[in-house]
Image: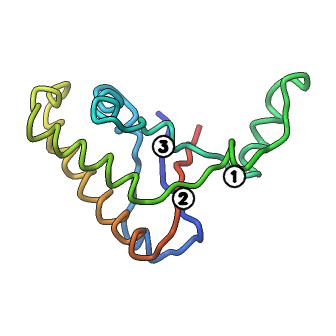
């Protein structure tokens, strides 16, 4: 399963601190629907590539399909408050629709733990005034 992790600009180690975030869970059902129902974009909307990541991907596809890197399209940056809005939507769903979090044992607890870690990191991102995007490992 691929990992989804936040990348910050400017890169400030204090934002992540000692935390580790793999946000892949938030891209699996029922999470995208929760975000959309709350009027937000799903996590995949925040995925972006660095120039190096894009070039590596571009080399792996047939030449006739390759295109140049466009930072605004391929590697956009977002305000960290956007991730905190996603977290708020999940907290509301945990409170108001607990039946959505029964796909596996302790799903609600796992979601809550990831939310706490995510909120801690993104509150630091807000304080440091850094932008973010999500990077995905293969």
Which quadrant of the rendered structure holds the C terminus? top right
Q: Residue at x 14, y 39 (%)?
A: 94
Q: How crowded is mark 2: few (under 14 residues within 10 Å), some or many (20 or more)?
A: many
Which of the pair 123/85 is nearer the observer?
Answer: 85
Are the two marked residues, 1 and 2, in contact with CB atoms closer than 8 angstroms?
A: yes
Are the two marked residues, 2 and 3, in contact with CB atoms closer than 8 angstroms?
A: no
Q: Which residue is drawn at 50% across and 75% down?
A: 13
Q: In this view, does 94 lie to the left or right of 60?
A: left
Q: Which mark is residue 7?
A: 2
Which residue was labeled with disc 1? 50
Q: In this view, does 29 lie to the left or right of 112?
A: right
Q: Is residue 79 above or below residue 23?
A: below
In the rendered image, residue 122, in percent from the top left (x then y), is placed at 37, 63
Which of the pair 6/103 is nearer the observer?
Answer: 6
Q: Residue at x 34, y 30 (%)?
A: 36
Q: Residues within 10 Å of mark 1 (few under 14, many from 20)?
A: some
Are the two marked residues, 3 and 1, in contact with CB atoms closer than 8 angstroms?
A: no
In the rendered image, residue 31, in percent from the top left (x then y), is placed at 31, 32
Answer with the quarter of the image where residue 61 lies.
Answer: top right
Q: Which color scheme is applied?
A: rainbow
Q: Residue 22 carries which label?
A: none
Callout in the foreground (2, 3): 2
- Whole-Å distance between the Cαs marked 3 and 1? 16 Å
- Secondary structure under tag 3 reads loop
- Whole-Å distance between the Cαs marked 2 and 3? 12 Å
In the rendered image, residue 26, in percent from the top left (x then y), is placed at 35, 38
- Whole-Å distance between the Cαs marked 1 and 2? 10 Å
Q: In this view, does 80 lie above or below 60?
A: below
Q: Is residue 132 above or below residue 26?
A: below
Which residue was labeled with disc 3? 3
Task: Looking at the image, tell me whether mark 3 or mark 1 is earlier in sequence order.
Answer: 3
- Secondary structure under tag 1 reads loop
């Amino acid at each position: 399963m691929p990992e989804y992790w936040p990348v910050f600009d400017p890169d400030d180690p204090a934002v992540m601190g000692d935390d580790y975030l793999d946000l892949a869970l938030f891209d699996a059902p029922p999470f995208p629907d929760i975000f959309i129902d709350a009027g937000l974009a799903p996590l995949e909307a925040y995925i972006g590539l660095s120039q190096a990541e894009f070039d590596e991907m571009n080399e792996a596809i047939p030449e006739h399909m390759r295109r140049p890197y466009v930072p605004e399209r391929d590697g956009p940056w977002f305000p960290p408050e956007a991730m905190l809005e996603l977290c708020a939507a999940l907290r509301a769903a945990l409170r108001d629709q607990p039946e959505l979090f029964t796909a596996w044992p302790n799903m609600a607890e796992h979601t809550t733990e990831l939310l706490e870690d995510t909120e801690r990191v993104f509150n630091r991102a807000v304080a440091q005034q850094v932008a973010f995007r999500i990077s995905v490992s293969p």
